[in-house]
Structure formats: C-alpha cells, structure tokens
Amino acid sequence: MNSNGFAIDVRDVTKKFGSRTVVNHIAMQVRHGEIYGFLGPNGSGKTTFLRMLCGLLRPDAGSGQCLGLDFRTQSGEIKKRVGYMTQRFSFYEDLSLEENLDFIARIYSVPDRKSAVDKSLERLGMTERRKQLAGQLSGGWKQRLALSACLIHEPQLLLLDEPTAGVDPKARRDFWDEIHRLAAAGLTVLITTHYMDEAERCHRLAYIAYGNLLAGGTVPDVLKNAKLTTWEVTGNDLPALAEKLRGKPGIEQIVAFGSTLHVSGRDETALRESATPFMTGAWRWQPIPSGLEDVFISLMETAKDNFS
Amino acid sequence: MHRVWAIIERDLRRFRRSPTLVFISIVMPLVQLVVLGYAFGGKIKHLVVGVVDMDHAVPAVKLQEMFQAIAANADTFTPIYYYDETTALRDLKNGRISGILEIPPDFSRRLLAGANPRIALVEDNTDQFSVAALEGSLDALLPAYNAAPVSPRLSATVTLKVVEVYPYVPYIQFLLPGVIVLAVFISAMIGGGIIFIDDKARGLHEGYLVTPISKFELILGFTLSGAVKAIIAGTVLITVGSIIAGIPDPLNPLRLARMFILVIATALALISMMFLIMVRVNDPLVPRAIFGMLNTVLYFPSGAVYPTQSFPQWMKAITVVDPFTYAVHGFKQLVLKNTGLVAISGDLLFLFCFTALAMGIATLLFRRTL
Ligand SMILES: Nc1ncnc2c1ncn2[C@@H]1O[C@H](COP(=O)(O)OP(=O)(O)O)[C@@H](O)[C@H]1O
Ligand SMILES: [Mg+2]
C-alpha cells in the first residue's frame, strides 16, 4: 500500500460498543515526522481510536493505511513498527526498571537486547537506578520509563495516550522537549492531551467530541475556522455582569479569567448587539483573539446539541 | 520462543518477590494434610454403650458376658449397665452414650421355645461414623452367640481370612496423594490464569497485546510459568508430605523421581485447565469467587478423600473427566504401593492429552484484541 507521504492516512473509521457509536466515521492524515495532537473531552473516543490504529481493537468500518500498511488487515506488521504508550502505565511495579525494559525488548525480539536496554536506561538518566522497582518511581519518572519502554524497538510511529496526565509542569516540559527531539529525528507522533499549552506545541491537531471530528489543522487554522469572536471585559462587579449577559442572543460563553471576563460567540453581530447596553463606564470592552480553549469549548457545546 | 521465555522469566521474578504466594501454595496443603489426616484418620474407640437387661435369665446373662468380652477385645465400645430403659434412653438423647443394647423381657422364653428371639440396638444415628463402627463390632456378637450352644468348642468353622496385600495404611497416608494434587491445584489457581486476569484488570495486558507476540506464545508462556510454580509446590509436598505422613522410606529417590514426573503432568493439566476456564474472564473477582466451588467440584469427586466406588452415578461422571482423578490415582499407586511408571501410564497419558486439549481450546478462545 502506498503511503503517499502520510504516516497515518485513514478514513471512515468507526467503532461501536453495542448500539453506541464511540468513534464515528473519523478521518485522519498525519505526515511523517509530524507531532499530531488529538484533543477532546473525556469519553470522546480518543483512546478507542488509537487502539484501532495499533490493532488492539477491531474497527467496525473504515479503511486506510498506517506506515504504508493496511490498518485493518496488517496489524501484525504495524505492531512491530509502532510504540504505544497506554493511558495507564503498562509496566510491572514489582519489577525493576531494567527488568521491565528487558521484558519489553524480548517481546519485541529486539536484536542485541542488552545494549538496547543499557542505551535506554542511559537516555533516561537512570543507569544507577536500574535495580530500583518501578513501583517506587514518582509520576514523572514513571512516564519517562513508559516512554523509554515504547521506544526500545525503535518504532517509526509513536502513539501516546495522555502521557502527561498527572505529571508536574517541569517534567511535562522536559517530556515535550524529548518529543520534539524525536520528531526532528524522523519519528511521527500522535498524542492525545487535555492541556491547551500542549495542543499549541503540536504541529497540527484534531479535535473530537462524542466520537465526531469537529476541527483539524494547524492551531491558526483551527482558530480561524472556528470564526469565534471574543471580548475581554474589565471593570467592577464582573460576576453581576456575567449574570446579566447569560442567555442573551449571540452570547455563547462567559468565562472568568482572573480579574477579567471573556465573552464569546460565533455570531459577531448578535454578540455585539447583546453587549452594547453594557458597554458603559463601569466596564471596559476590548476585542481579543479567541484562544484554543474558547474554541474547543464552543465546539463541544455545539456538538452536544448535535450528537448527544 | 524468545517471547515465551520473556513471559516465564517475568512471571517467576514477580513470584519470587511475593513470598506470601509462595507460602500459601506450599503451607496450606501441608496444614490440610495434617489436620484432615488426623481429624478423619483415627479408628473410633471407646464409644459408651448402655446395656438394659429386662430378662435376667441365664441366656440373657450369657449374651451380656459375650458382649463384655467383645468390648474388652476390640476397644470400640465400653458397656455400662442400666436397670431401666427410660434412664438409658434419656442418656442416649443427652449424648452421654452412643447406643443401647436392649435384651427384651421375653428373650429367654422365646429362645427356649425356638421362636426367634430378638435383641435391639438403639442408636444415636445422627452420627453415622460411630454407628457404623458400633454395628461393625456387634456383627461379631450374634454369630458367636448362635454358634456357641450347638457346636462343641474348637469345632472347625469356616471363617473368612482377609489377606492384606500392603501394610496397613493410616488415613493420613491415604490422604497424601490428594493433598499433593491439591497443592498443585492451589498453585495453579493463584499462579495460572489469574495472573492474566489481574493484568487485564490493571490494564497491563495492553502493554503486551500491542506487541507482535502471538496468542500461542502468550498462552504457552503463562502455562509454563504457572507450571513451574505448581511444580515447586508439588515437589515440596512429595518430599515433606511423605515425611509428615510417615510413608516408609519417604525419600526413596526412585519413587521421588517417578512422583516428580507425575507432578509435572498434573501441574500442566491443572494450569491449562485454569487458563481455559479463565480465558474469557475479565473481572478479577470471578476467579476468586469460583475457586472454592472448583475446589469442591474437582477435589472431592476424584477419590482423594473417599473411595469413588461409593459415589452416585452423576458424580462418577465427573470423576471420569476430572483430571484430579487421574492425578490422585497415579499418586496413590506411587505413594501407597510404590509401583513403577507402567502402573500409572494411563494416568500420565490422560493428563498429557488433557493438557494438549485444554491449551488448544484456550488458544482458539483467546482474544488477541481488547
Ligand atoms: N471496551 C469498551 N466497551 C464499552 N464501551 C467502551 C469500551 N471502551 C470504551 N468505551 C466507551 O467509549 C467511549 C470512548 O472512550 P475512550 O475512547 O476511552 O474516550 P477518551 O479516550 O477520549 O476519553 C467512552 O464512553 C467509554 O465508556
Ligand atoms: Mg482516553
């Protein structure tokens, strides 16, 4: 199968659990060497989608290729070339770091296992702690061990499922630096996340809710396509203002940001009409560019009306 | 094979780090051996039997004398004498005595008239074991009494001579084969299919299902690593158990070698059976919930604690397909009779075929996806 420049190129991917459609005709194209962010609220189908890509779940419909291999019929081959970091860390707390890595390396039949494990420990900066039990590691270190484990067979594609959940900001930043280094070296990375700052560190991203793909592209593309207008309001007694604005035509989101209020909506004219009566001396209104979070919340609200 | 070894090594490393599991799989069967062995094993002795003689004539006194003689010989019971039936019955109901031998008032009269006299044995039949022991001893009383007046002393009477082929086997030794199998079974339960279910519950299985490992490699790896643990438990039992049960020459190397082969066959059969039962289970509570039941359904019909000949038809059906049966039968030959491998070749054949079949079906049923 021709990969035509994409590491992942799938369409109409669908998965049902019973009568519930959890992933609904999703298409995704990820270029080689790209960091692709996959965002969406909890339960939107991100994990399910990743599992279908690496052959852990069988899709009900869909077609396409992953690393030039048919993702529905060649999952055995795909598995050899993909590193998957599960949402729950999949290693053994009662085995040492070294033993965990050695186990994975053996399962992947890595040639020269010993040096692969040594190299991996070295990159982790854990050579001296190789005998430590994995269960004794802190969250950040666990996550680094998990990343090392899924890199040990030198995959071409990394699927990372919320790798930074519950990890402190410093460790998160280090993690992302590592991801960027890997991508620069040619690895393709598909990563799910909840964090907006992480979304902005991806080359491109997709947003999914209720199993439906709602937006995709680069961050500026997503912002532009959302056609969302946002005003920032400063002044006194903002909670009272929020109460007055709520439910007015065109006003879709009112979010408190520190000492300011963000008011957004997709219908610019309606929003301005509803806001005009409150543009008095007490409150200062100023148009600002919409943030990714505003856009995603807006997308999700709309999706809720359409799909749930 | 690389991958199979990876799974085995991983499993054994984890096993080594959890001494509780090692302890349970070895110590529990030993405890059972000792407690069950002594709780059921002993001969019943010194049951107190009341004697009520309502006749008092010579034939009745003679009967009493013979009864007394049997009591003194066999030790099974001790007679005490009552003057009236009411007191005796009250004591029987209170549990102070286990039975009453009643000689009715017309005993001598009927005997002399040749009119089939009767005596009665009133039993506390809530306790079947004591009753059986009592009836067994009294069985000797009547023939002796009947024979006495007619035949002269020292006449040639035909008696059944029981030839015992093997030395007397105390119950604890009878129980040992079953307990060896039980130790292997407990290890199979806590070290077999349940490992995979716990992996599933913790999401660890995703980690290896996403690798290129095949179904068969996974099942073989789990089966072999579980078997190693079960074999360790079985090996401790065939040695320590033999010593505890007082098997003559307990460390005879040839017998231990034969038993070791049977331990391997038993471990493989029970582990693969557990894996087959658990192959589609996801909830880690399920295996824990069904262990007790499995234990009852497989252990008792196997003849490990009571001879299979006494079983009703439906239970005999279980006995036939139960791998426990063959393992227990094999160990009985080796432990109690010290036979060679030929005597247990049928058992070994069954256990190996059972293993192959169970693993084959488990592989078919195993889901490679989540
Ligand atoms: N094996 C399963 N059986 C039934 N429902 C499932 C299964 N796995 C996931 N789901 C459901 O599918 C939906 C999507 O789940 P998931 O893909 O884990 O979402 P996300 O990763 O985006 O949080 C959820 O509502 C979840 O409950
Ligand atoms: Mg998820």
Image (spheres, grey):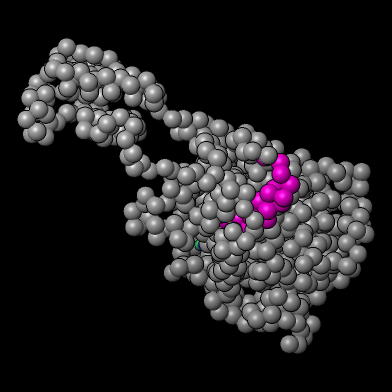
Task: Tell me which residue sits at (45%, 68%) in the image.
Answer: A18
Q: Nearer the viewer, residue A78 or A169?
A: A78
Task: Tell me which residue sits at (66%, 69%) in the image.
Answer: B216
Task: Tell me which residue sits at (47%, 52%) in the image.
Answer: B302
Q: Quadrant of residue A26?
A: bottom right
Q: Which percent across, then down, holds residue A6?
A: 76, 80
Quadrant where the N terminus of chain B is found in the figure? bottom right
Q: Quadrant of residue B5?
A: bottom right
Residue B196 lies within the magenta run = no
Q: Which percent across, then down, holds residue B301?
A: 43, 51
Q: Nearer the viewer, residue B239 or A272?
A: B239
Secondary structure character of the magenta stretch overall: helix
Whether residue A231 can be seen here? no
Q: Which percent across, then down, holds residue A275?
A: 54, 55
Residue B264 lies left or right of residue B9; in this view the side is: left
Position above or below: B362 against A125? below
Residue B49 lies left or right of residue A106; in this view the side is: left
Q: Nearer the viewer, residue B225 or B281?
A: B225
Quadrant where the C terminus of chain B is found in the figure? bottom right
Whether residue A19 can be seen here? yes
Q: Quick one: which residue is furthest to the top in this view?
A: B83
The residue segment tinted magenta is B250-271
Position above or below: A2 against B215? below
Q: Which percent across, then down, holds residue B63?
A: 22, 23
Residue B118 lies left or right of residue A58; in this view the side is: left
Task: Tell me which residue sits at (81%, 71%) in the image.
Answer: A156
Residue B267 lies within the magenta run = yes
